[in-house]
């Protein structure tokens, strides 16, 4: 009587079972055979890098701002200029009618970041980090050179600044606005328009002071600011 041969099971061939590292190598080889996938990924990463760079390029405008302003019954004062980008100036516009190009007076300021601006009847105060700057406004509209006073403690906010309202802006951090500025002799409107710039991730800001008659008809418009500010951007 014949007997069937007994099948002897062989131990599993370890070479036939890919290890974790071999599996990773296999996936890598498959991905190498499909280079288009990596090209797409590289393009996406490159696009993200471009967007990050664009955001970074626009960010200096947010590190410091210009266009803070204040008013009295006789003048409007505002500062312009970004340290390292454009001259720092205080501009004062007389609110005595009629409004014209000659209503504007300009004085050069040292380079410093403005932490507050306050208009008084005959002077403009500008608060820096460690100095207080004062510009006298003469009755004829002339301006005297800024004089500075060192603060006892850097970052100190004098008491007369603490009770002031939030800083208003007509420049790089301004919002669209139409603000009436009425005096006993005339009606004015501070108008800020914001539109898309021709550059990506950038907006154009244009502010003007407009004199109107009592019926609201425009008499004269004086441009105060024409600049740009960064904008959120994406795909």
Image (tube, rainbow, N blue to C red):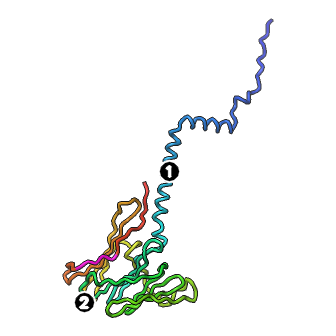
Asked whether, in this view, residue 174 is left or right of residue 157, the answer is left
Q: Residue furthest top?
A: 1
12 relative to 88, above or below: above
Residue 46's label in the rendered image is 1
Q: Does 43 lie within the magenta span?
A: no
Q: Work out whether 54 lies above or below 114.
A: above
**Where does the magenta region start and end?**
220-224
When asked about the image quadrant of residue 218, the answer is bottom left
In terms of depth relative to the viewer, which is nearer, 112 or 235? Answer: 112
Q: CA distance from mark 2 to mark 1?
A: 59 Å
The residue located at (42%, 64%) in the rendering is 231
x, y percent for residue 38 = 53, 42
- Comparing 21 with 212, the one in front is 212
The mark found on residue 185 in the picture is: 2
Considering the whole magenta stretch, tell me its main secondary structure.
strand
Which of marks 1 and 2 precedes in the sequence?
1
Residue 235: image location, x then y, percent: 42, 54
Q: Residues within 10 Å of mark 2 (few under 14, many from 20)?
A: few
Q: Would you say 165 lies left or right of 154 here?
A: left
Residue 230: assigned label: none
Report the front residue among 47 and 112.
112
Residue 70 percent coordinates (x, y): 38, 84
Classify mark 1: residues with Cα within 10 Å, few (<14), some (14-19) or many (20+).
few
Image position of 196 with respect to 192: above or below: above
């Amino acid at each position: 009587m014949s007997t069937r041969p007994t099948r002897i099971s062989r131990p599993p061939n370890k070479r036939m079972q890919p290890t974790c590292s071999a599996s990773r190598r296999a996936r890598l080889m498959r991905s190498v055979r499909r280079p288009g996938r990596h090209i797409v990924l590289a393009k996406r990463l490159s696009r993200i890098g471009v967007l990050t760079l664009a955001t970074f390029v626009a960010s200096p405008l947010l590190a410091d701002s210009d266009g803070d302003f204040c008013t009295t019954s006789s003048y409007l004062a505002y500062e312009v200029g970004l340290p390292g980008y454009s001259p720092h100036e205080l501009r004062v516009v007389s609110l005595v009618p009629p409004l014209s190009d000659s209503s504007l007076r300009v004085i050069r300021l040292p380079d410093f970041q403005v932490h507050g601006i306050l208009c008084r009847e005959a002077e403009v105060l500008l608060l820096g980090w460690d100095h207080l700057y004062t510009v006298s406004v003469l009755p004829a509209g002339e301006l005297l050179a800024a004089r500075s006073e060192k603060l006892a403690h850097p970052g100190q906010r004098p008491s007369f600044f603490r009770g002031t309202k939030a800083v208003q802006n007509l420049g790089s951090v301004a919002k669209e606005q139409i603000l009436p500025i009425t005096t006993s002799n005339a009606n004015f409107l501070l108008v800020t328009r914001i539109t898309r710039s021709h550059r990506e991730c950038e907006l154009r800001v244009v502010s003007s002071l407009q004199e109107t008659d009592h019926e609201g008809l425009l008499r004269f418009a004086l441009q105060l600011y024409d600049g740009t500010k960064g904008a959120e951007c994406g795909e």
